[in-house]
């Protein structure tokens, strides 16, 4: 193939959150999108909200496979056999789908078809799923990994890149093994850690949970994700995850030994705990900032806010009036309190002007 312009039609197989969001993003650009799903109700709902049509009769230029992880390789092979289109997928693990698709195409005597397959993975999502969770802007500013294999046609790789860019994402190209280790670090391991932390709350007394603040909400937020889907993801990426979990186990053992010494609080025990915490700080500052920019130091400005309609809008308007750019924010709305606390993160040079303006306008501000 030589034409790498994204003309369409684009066939989307699987109309959950990701598939529907891709359809919505392409449809707003006028690209013809065909919707296919084993669940007719999902396809119908995606069609009704404008993600495409179930009745497109034209041969697709590109097929996007957005089905549950266990079925990705099979559907890739089916689409390579049924069409002459470039085929990509949106699965969060690339090694297993590639291996499955390769085995199936070779068994069918169609190994050359695999040149039209290019793996990809949009790094965007939500704890919600299904077509109604879909958003046309889901991928705006997100990273979209492209993972060609050794026989991928360069023109097919370019077409998949055009797909990602049409959806508003920025692309990064990785080998399949590098991708799977990367997502194990930045996505799959955090999911397991969140689930483990949330699991300790199941049998917690109610009075313990009443002390909950933003910290526990931050750590456990993604634990609410679909267990069935994540079981498939974790199983598919078990080699990369196993190595990382062994590292975590070693660090946990280190902490347990430090905390179980005969004299907890001794200098040697404290040194071990401090070393673990400092390593965490060193890792945290390596996480990119917004828009993929390097991490920058921000100063939190804490504002007490009444739990009444319109107060958040007023706070944002007053913050804007200060001229300070709010780089990030968090809202702590602990139960049982008549007020909440908003943490506005700004660059150090903006702190004084933000505090002065908010204080002048009646807000309770502290740093």
Image (tube, rainbow, N blue to C red):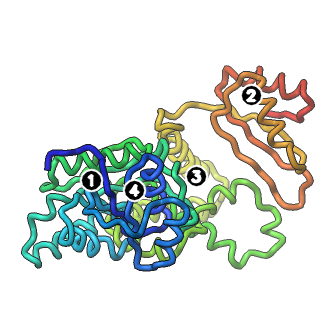
- Crowding at dot 2, Cα within 10 Å, few <14 / some 14-19 / many 20+, comes out as some
* Residue in the image at 61% along x and 48% along y: 267
Q: Of discs 4 and 1, which sits in the foreground? A: 1
Looking at the picture, tell me which residue is in the foreground, 352 or 49: 49
Label 4 or label 1, whichever comes before in sequence order: 1
- Crowding at dot 1, Cα within 10 Å, few <14 / some 14-19 / many 20+, comes out as many
Q: Of discs 3 and 4, which sits in the foreground? A: 4
Mark 4 sits on what residue? 183
When asked about the image quadrant of residue 215, the answer is bottom right
Label 2 or label 1, whichever comes before in sequence order: 1
Q: Residue furthest left?
A: 109
Alpha-carbon span between mark 4 and mark 2: 36 Å
For numbered disc 3, what is the local secondary structure? Answer: helix
Mark 2 sits on what residue? 320
Alpha-carbon span between mark 3 and mark 2: 41 Å
Can residue 242 be spotted in the picture? no
Q: Pointers 3 and 4 in contact (CB under 8 A)?
A: no
Looking at the picture, tell me which residue is in the foreground, 129 or 281: 129
Q: Pointers 4 and 2 in contact (CB under 8 A)?
A: no
Looking at the picture, tell me which residue is in the foreground, 181 or 205: 181
> In the rendering, at what x and y percent does residue 284 appear?
53, 44
Label 4 or label 2, whichever comes before in sequence order: 4
When asked about the image quadrant of residue 104, the answer is bottom left
- Crowding at dot 3, Cα within 10 Å, few <14 / some 14-19 / many 20+, comes out as some
Mark 3 sits on what residue? 273
* Residue in the image at 26% along x and 43% along y: 5
Label 3 or label 1, whichever comes before in sequence order: 1
For numbered disc 2, what is the local secondary structure? Answer: helix
Mark 1 sits on what residue? 147
Q: Quadrant of the C terminus?
A: top right
Q: Pointers 3 and 2 in contact (CB under 8 A)?
A: no
């Amino acid at each position: 193939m030589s034409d790498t312009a994204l003309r369409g039609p684009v066939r989307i197989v699987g109309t959950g959150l990701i598939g529907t969001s891709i359809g919505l993003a392409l449809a707003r650009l006028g690209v013809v999108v065909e919707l296919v799903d084993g669940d007719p109700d999902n396809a119908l709902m995606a069609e009704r909200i404008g993600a495409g049509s179930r009745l497109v009769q034209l041969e697709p230029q590109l097929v996007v496979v957005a089905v549950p992880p266990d079925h990705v390789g099979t559907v890739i092979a089916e689409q390579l056999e049924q069409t002459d289109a470039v085929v990509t997928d949106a699965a969060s693990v690339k090694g297993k789908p590639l291996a499955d698709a390769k085995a199936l195409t070779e068994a069918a005597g169609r190994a050359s078809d695999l040149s039209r397959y290019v793996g990809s993975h949009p790094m965007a999502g939500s704890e919600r799923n299904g077509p109604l969770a879909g958003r046309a802007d889901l991928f705006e500013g997100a990273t979209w990994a492209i993972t060609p294999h050794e026989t991928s046609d360069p023109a097919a790789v370019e077409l998949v890149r055009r797909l990602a860019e049409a959806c508003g994402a920025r692309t990064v190209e990785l080998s399949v093994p590098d991708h799977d280790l990367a997502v194990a670090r930045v996505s799959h391991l955090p999911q397991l850690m969140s689930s483990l932390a949330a699991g300790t709350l199941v049998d917690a007394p109610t009075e313990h949970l009443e002390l909950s603040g933003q910290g526990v909400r931050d750590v456990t937020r993604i634990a609410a994700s679909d267990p069935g889907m994540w079981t498939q993801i974790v199983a598919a990426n078990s080699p990369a995850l196993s190595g990382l979990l062994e590292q975590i186990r070693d660090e946990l053992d280190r902490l347990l030994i430090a905390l179980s010494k005969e004299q907890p609080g001794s200098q040697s025990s404290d040194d071990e705990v401090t070393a673990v915490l400092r390593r965490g700080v060193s890792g945290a500052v390596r996480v990119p900032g917004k828009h993929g920019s390097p991490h920058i130091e921000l100063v939190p400005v804490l504002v007490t806010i009444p739990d009444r309609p319109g107060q958040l809008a007023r706070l944002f308007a007053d913050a804007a009036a200060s001229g300070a750019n709010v780089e990030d924010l968090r809202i702590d709305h602990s139960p049982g309190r008549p007020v909440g606390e908003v943490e506005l993160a700004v660059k150090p040079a903006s702190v004084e002007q933000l505090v002065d303006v908010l204080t002048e306008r009646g807000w309770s501000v502290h740093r």
